[in-house]
Image (cartoon, grey):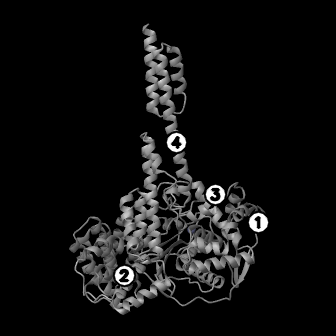
Amino acid sequence: MSTVGGTPVPPARALRACALVVTVLASAPPARAEVPPFVTRATWVELHTPEYTLVTDASPAVRGDVRRLLRRFSRLLQATYPGTRTRTAEPTWVYLFREQAEMDRYRPQSFESAGAWYSTTERGNLLVLSGRTEGAQRSEVVLHEFVHLYVHANFDAAPAWLNEGLAQYYSTTLLTGNGAEVGMPDPNAFGLMGGLREPMTFDLLFAMNPDAEAYRQDNDLRNVFYAQSHVLVHMLLSSPARSAAFAAFLEKLRTGTRARLAFRASFPESTWNRLAAELRPYCRNIGAGTTRHVALASDTEEPATEQVLSAAEALTRLGELSLDLSKAQLPMAAEHFRAALALDPAMARAQVGLGVAEDMRGNAAEAERSYRLALKGTISDPWMPVSAGRGTMQRLRQAAQARAANDTLAAIVRQAHGRFRLGMDLDPDDFGGVVGSATTAMLLGVRPDTTLVRRLEQVAAITPGRPDVTAALAAFRKSQNVGTPPPAEVKADPLSLQNVLALAEADSATHAGHLTGQKRYDEARAMFARIRDRNPAGSQVHDMAELEIKRIDAKVRVDRAMDLLKNGKFAEAEKLVSPDYPWPDEPYFRDNVPLLRNAVRDAARNVSRVESEIERVNGLIRAGKVTEARAALTKLLATDLPEDVKSYLRKRIQTIDAAQKAK
Ligand SMILES: [Zn+2]
């Protein structure tokens, strides 16, 4: 799972979710294994449109309203930025709950107070919404989250400020019968920015990843980040000239230019400070704000097939959602599938879901039992084999982490490959079947057939940001260029299997990021090195991995220098924080490395001052000037010194006092 999260909750503003941020404001809800009772009581409907599959227990009126919002908003985005997409290569699932309280049972434990959330998962996009969100307009949360999907579909390299800024900018849109009123300022964001003395610099904005360790605990900074992102996007869209430059920036981003470069082309770096300084007066002068009207032709609802779900089917759909939440919520997922099977023992989709849940919990034997039951007989739906393939890949990751033997790993990959291929045989366009077949073919060193390569290229063209797809394509192209004879199957190729963990994981970079967050630097570095090495130099993924390695090395250096400083090894510490080291050009290092360098120097100076002072005290004592020596020690004690030095000084004073008393 990647790019997910909930927004920090601004005062007097409704709860609303965001991508990219994980807010930990209160304690997480406890993971309860049981199925919430409302699931089997409510009436659930599943609705298929070309854009998404909607699973909902909301009323037909609310359902219709959400569909209208998604449709009209897609129109608006396409009209505003021609040539952009409002869907991705991955399928999209929209879960629309009747109530906020219902939705609260189905959000990742790490998110706090998210009124809605968006996430890219292995099976595709997940948009989880509530029909009734306390305090906020329904449209606000729906539009905000949909912008994150839109950004993922078009501007995958978008910096976090753009993603959140656009989401907030468009969340206030009022969609009417003949058009849209766009650009209503959010009073909280404008109030916060208007009163702020110092806006964040563009360097910090670009470096900001609210998920990153460096920023995670700083709620103030994050609130400013959200507010500034909103106001900045608002300001850049406020005049025709700027709005045209902004559109050019987005277009560059869409065609693969890196964020900073693309932004510079529209807004030269020499103007950045002026732009930042403009934000405060812009906020103060906005008044009640004006909106711009975008005309949109009226349209009718696109056809959709709609079916009422049985209780067992509803349990299965919500079990599938539970699989995408968090590890702690896996028992709950399994409970959903078991409850479904209790109602309908023949339901293959519940059976395969249970298998995946078992695989994710490390119970391979139980998982296989479920897959066998799910895959027996005639299967027509690719969902079953593809899900089993995904579960098998989970097992592969665990086996690789446990450093299983290569032939064990190879056997697991072969099994997964067979399942994905079966999915593709049933439906050559099945997204999971295509991506799974490609990934496993790459791991096994099997040359893919042309259908697979062509489908993969189509996926990459529509959604360029998927690392698993780009890695597989790069590997296939490489083997074609080299012109090696097609090996029928490379038996347990140790090289590719060594890479299994990183290669197989769609979320390997995210995983490595988590390792970094947990300070498991060696593992994270090794993982990023594998990602770097299997992607061609100059590619976005390669450069990303390289930068991450550079960051980790620098962070390790900083941590070591701090340890050395604590242990009084100043010369070594100073060497580590030398300005000659190629520090990543990022605010964290720009701010902290000089501070640390000064601290090391101050501490070294302090120690030598203390040493020479003690030297002098010793001289005074030798000369019999005990009172003077005591005074010098007392004075020294009052200065800022490490505790062990202070304790030494106290003991010296006590010794002097004891000697005086004895006299
Ligand atoms: Zn957001």
Q: Which mark is residue 632?
A: none
Q: Which residue is mark 3?
A: 11
User: Disc 2 or 4, which lies upstream in sequence?
Assistant: 2
Task: Name the residue type under label 2.
Answer: Ala
Structural distance between the alpha carbons of marks 2 and 1: 53 Å
Does residue 570 appear to the left or right of 530 in the view shown? right
Quadrant where ligand 1 appears: bottom right
Residue 107 in sight in this render: no
Q: Which residue is mark 2?
A: 475
Q: Which residue is mark 1?
A: 286
Q: Decide: marks 2, 3 in contact (CB < 8 A)?
A: no
Tell me where residue 353 appears, x and y as whole percent: 34, 75
Q: Decide: marks 1, 4 in contact (CB < 8 A)?
A: no
User: Disc 2 or 1, which lies upstream in sequence?
Assistant: 1
Question: With respect to residue 399, does 621 lie above or below?
Answer: above
Tell me where residue 216 appears, x and y as whole percent: 51, 57
User: Which residue is more in the foreground, 657 or 381?
Assistant: 657
2 vs 4, front mark: 4
User: Which residue is more in the foreground, 596 or 403?
Assistant: 596
Secondary structure beneath label 3 = loop
Figure quadrant of residue 331: bottom left
Label 4 Cα crowd, 10 Å radius (few <14 / some 14-19 / many 20+): some
